[in-house]
Amino acid sequence: DQQVKQNSPSLSVQEGRISILNCDYTNSMFDYFLWYKKYPAEGPTFLISISSIKDKNEDGRFTVFLNKSAKHLSLHIVPSQPGDSAVYFCAASSTSGTYKYIFGTGTRLKVLA
Amino acid sequence: DTAVSQTPKYLVTQMGNDKSIKCEQNLGHDTMYWYKQDSKKFLKIMFSYNNKELIINETVPNRFSPKSPDKAHLNLHINSLELGDSAVYFCASSQELASSDTQYFGPGTRLTVL
């Protein structure tokens, strides 16, 4: 039962343009969401997070949007750079007690120079 | 300085063997985790420990036994290895046991069972 889904396995974007990565979840108990970036042969690296009390969080070129009614979040990268090429995982958790993240299967982003 | 380190990085072994993967964090965190990433790229939690106490055990076969000798270390021992155990295993740590606490991952150990 996949509670967190990233339906696009891959995405290609031109350098300088916007990258939009999407994530859907099914469990209404999730109230904290994160994005991780992963390069080959490395572990996932935390990128940005958002609590369900917000609908947007911004950190430099990275912005996460949360639509609770649609159970959907997205990560926007503007402008995209070749170094952003990686696999991006979204993750969700419930702060009311299970102490674990549920990860999506990732989207491979390729930023073309 | 590597925040979360794992050894070995690669492990190739025969079915039926017993092997261990070691994890150490130098972040002073209280909570550590083991994740498994299978061939379909699902990254799933296996165990978590908080202050050396087992908190999460996610229906993992008994052949997998985590051991936390102290807060900075969480090792994973696997008995009687099977083909389906082939995966990348990631260790992670967080400051405390909280679902909103950022987890920091190690580089992973790629286990191949022949």
Image (cartoon, coloured by chain):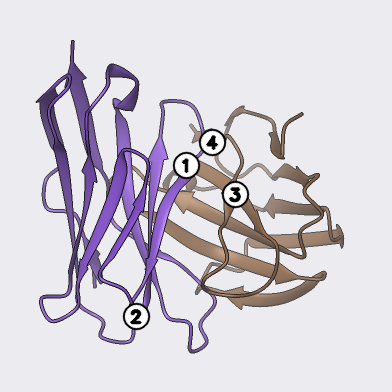
Chain colours: A purple, B brown
Crowding near the residue tagged with mark 3, few <14, some 14–19, many ≥20 C-alpha atoms within 10 Å: many
Considering the numbered disc 4 on the image, is that residue within a helix, a strand or a loop? Answer: strand
Mark 1 vs mark 4: give the one in front: 1
Considering the numbered disc 3 on the image, is that residue within a helix, a strand or a loop? Answer: strand
Q: Are marks 1 and 2 in contact (CB under 8 Å)?
A: no
x and y, in percent, of residue A97 in the image: 52, 87
Q: Is residue B33 found left or right of A80 in the rendered image?
A: right
Q: Chain of mark 1?
A: A
Q: Which amino acid, mark 2? A: Ile
Q: Chain of mark 4?
A: B
Mark 4 vs mark 3: give the one in front: 3
Camera-side residue: A50 or B55? A50
Mark number, residue B104: 3
Q: What residue sits right under mark 1 in the picture?
A: A44
Dot 1 or dot 2, earlier in sequence: 1
Could you tell me how far apart the alpha carbons at marks 4 and 3 are, in whole angstroms? 21 Å
Considering the numbered disc 1 on the image, is that residue within a helix, a strand or a loop? Answer: loop
Could you tell me how far apart the alpha carbons at marks 2 and 3 are, in whole angstroms? 24 Å
Camera-side residue: A48 or B105? A48
Q: Are marks 3 and 1 in contact (CB under 8 Å)?
A: no
Q: Which amino acid, mark 3? A: Tyr
Q: Chain of mark 3?
A: B
Crowding near the residue tagged with mark 4, few <14, some 14–19, many ≥20 C-alpha atoms within 10 Å: many
Q: Are marks 1 and 4 in contact (CB under 8 Å)?
A: no
Same chain for labels 1 and 4? Say yes or no: no
Q: What residue sits right under mark 4 in the picture?
A: B111
